[in-house]
Amino acid sequence: MATIRLGDKAPNFNAKTTEGEINFHEWLGNSWGILFSHPADYTPVCTTELGTVAKYKDEFDKRNVKVVALSVDGLESHKGWIGDINETQGTTVNFPIIADEDKKVSELYDMIHPNADSNLTVRSVFVIGDDKKVKLIITYPASTGRNFDELLRVIDSLQLTAYHKVATPPNWNNGEDVVVSPAIATEDIPSMFPKGHKVIKPYLRTTPQPNLD
Ligand code: BEZ
């Protein structure tokens, strides 16, 4: 297992999922992707997380993001559990769940942290860009459910950086001013950001979010 770092190409794999066999890179196609792991099927936090993700599908679609979950349980277990998720969370699971019984993908992505648990994955999140590069890695312990609003917020930031050469300040939310990349010379800002800009310091320049009408 090699360490995966930001900017690396996301390792490819073939896997069994609840929506059939996938080749990860082919399944991603031209989309962005989220690969996220769950400690185990039929557990309370995981059940509520997967229901939450199903309800966010429109938000992921808007951002051209495909989502795939993973746990080290098998396909039959996943399929039974999906029934419980749908029943208890009032939703329909609308994304594949990888059955990683042989731990091939978990080990490839370093999702098992032996000093936390020797067999189960932690709650890992990998956001992968449409260039197949790893853009974000977050790791939560099994006992803490993830904040999917934060994940959407970060994806908005990542996509602004990828497509508009801007960065986002702390606690930024969609619609608020953004920071012009330090790589852009101040004299080039007016042509690149015609909505206006402020020079607070030569290295700190802000502009209205460029991808809004
Ligand atoms: C849960 O999903 O609720 C969970 C799973 C493993 C350890 C702790 C909580």
Image (cartoon, rainbow, N blue to C red):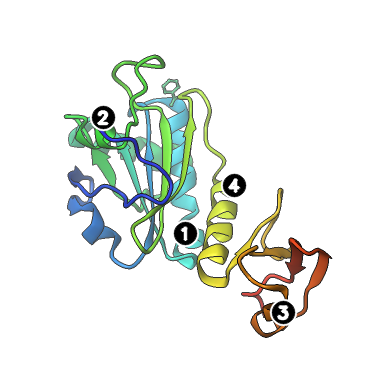
Packing grade of label 1 (10 A; few <14, some 14-19, many >=20) is: some
- Residue 56 image offset from top left, x and y in percent: 50, 54
In x, y percent, where is residue 175?
70, 66
Q: Contact, CB < 8 Å: mark 4 with mark 3?
A: no
Q: CA distance from mark 4 to mark 3?
A: 34 Å
Quarter holding residue 104: top left
Element type at mark 2: loop
Amino acid type for the residue under numbered disc 3:
Glu
- Mark 3–mark 2 distance (CA, rounded to whole Å): 53 Å
Task: Please tell me which of labels 1 and 3 falls first in the chain.
Answer: 1
CB under 8 Å between callouts 2 and 4? no
On the picture, is 90 further left or further right than 106? right
The percent position of residue 183, horizontal first and vertical second, equals: 61, 66
Q: Amino acid at mark 2?
A: Val
Q: Earlier in the sequence, mark 4 or mark 3?
A: 4
Tag 2 residue: 72
Give the mark, 3 or 2, whose residue is nearer the N terminus.
2
How far apart in space, not on screen, are marks 2 and 1 (Cα)?
A: 24 Å
- What SS does tag 3 mark? helix
Q: Quadrant of ligand 1?
A: top left
- Mark toward the viewer: 4 or 3: 3
- On the image, numbered disc 1 is attached to which residue? 60
**Mark 2 vs mark 4: which is more N-terminal?**
2
The mark that comes first in sequence, 2 or 1, is 1
Cα–Cα gap, marks 1 and 3: 36 Å
Q: Amino acid at mark 4?
A: Glu
Quarter of the image where the C terminus is located:
bottom right
Mark 4: give few (<14), some (14-19) or many (20+) Cα within 10 Å: few
Q: Which of the two residues, 17 or 196, is positioned nearer the viewer here?
A: 196
